[in-house]
Image (cartoon, rainbow, N blue to C red):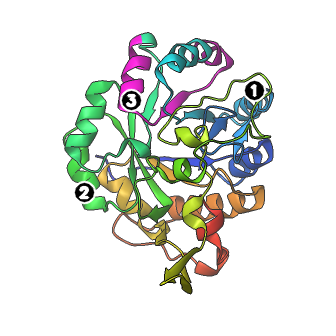
Amino acid sequence: MTANRRGTLLAPAGSIEAAAAGLDAGADAIYVGLKGWSRGGARGELTAAELQEVLVLARQREAAVQLALNTIPRGQETDFLLERLAGLREWGIAGVIVNDPGILARIRRSFPDLSLTASIGSGALNREDVALLEEAGASAVVLPGTIDPAEIAEIRASVTVQIEVMVHMVDEFHQLGKCWMPSYYRTHPAPMPEMPADGERLTGSIKRGGAGVCFKVCLQPWDLYLDGKRVDARTLPARQVSRAGDVRAYLEAGADVIKLQGRSLAPEMVSLLVRQFRIAMDTAPDGRQAVHVERGTLPPSWVVVGR
């Protein structure tokens, strides 16, 4: 790859205001969820009308918008998803992000010219995984920021698909996007107030017991009992990965997109996050020298709010 690759900074947006904040702070593109189609539930999802407003905003800024369709629909829901996707293409989305290789392959057969990103939930961790997703029809594959730049270079040498690295993310004890915990939490969920009135929430995905929605069960404290007596309270392990100092190394290794997690973030936090990584991407002296980023710019509760 050529030296000093600029790359694309892809920012999260869970609202119109967050989309504007991310673009103002220097994002080249944003990704959003559509209400009823995203594993985050109402947290960080847009209505159809809000999506149209974001698309207008992005066109004004000459930026691209990707749409996360990262639930895994039930069999009978897939036809409905494809039907809606045909209409959404006409609105001007740059591509879609999907969580399941089978659904990705089905969409590719139906829409051969549509840009398809295999989400981090697809589980790619090495060059063989990426090559398999490319064969299934992926235009891009998202890899976690726990993979080092040297590994990205090894993958880049073996595939032609676009490589995205989620350099700001929460690394949890389970595989992101494949968690079963909400299904145990709400095995028979009542209709949720955030469900669209038109019934367009896809009920599939691993979280079928939770109607395809993440309830952040892993972030709740768990009581520990011994012989019927509560002895302690713990939270399940998670750590914040935020590799601003390594973005130039990732780009030199062949990454095409620097991706940030956080569709639930408030606009002001999106702005902070994007600005930090914009500086890291643009001002590094060379590909071998890390960028110093002031840690105090991010809130101490980022692990909780930054998903």
Q: Which residues are magenta?
A: 85-109
Task: Decide if residue 55 is on the left or right side of residue 258.
Answer: right
Amino acid at dot 1: Ala
Q: Earlier in the sequence, mark 3 or mark 1?
A: 1
Q: Position of residue 260 (x, y in %)?
A: 54, 54
Q: Residue at horizontal 64%, vertical 13%?
A: 87
Q: Are marks 2 and 3 in contact (CB under 8 Å)?
A: no
Tell me the CA gap for discs 2 and 1: 39 Å
Density class for disc 2 (Cα within 10 Å; few <14, some 14-19, many ≥20) is some
Residue beneath disc 3? 139
Q: Residue furthest front?
A: 227
**SS for callout 3:** loop
Q: Earlier in the sequence, mark 2 or mark 1?
A: 1
> Which of the 4 quarters of the picture holds residue 303?
bottom right
Q: Position of residue 202 (x, y in %)?
A: 60, 28
Q: Earlier in the sequence, mark 2 or mark 3?
A: 3
Pick the residue in front: 84 or 163: 84
Pick the residue in front: 183 or 24: 183
Amino acid at dot 2: Glu
* Image depth: mark 2 or mark 1 in front: 1
**SS for callout 1:** helix
Q: Main secondary structure of the magenta part?
A: helix
Q: Are marks 2 and 1 in contact (CB under 8 Å)?
A: no
Give yes or no for residue 104 being in the magenta stretch: yes
Q: Is residue 30 visible?
A: no
Q: Position of residue 118 (x, y in %)?
A: 41, 36
Q: Residue at horizontal 45%, vertical 28%?
A: 116
Residue beneath disc 1? 48
Q: Are marks 3 and 1 in contact (CB under 8 Å)?
A: no
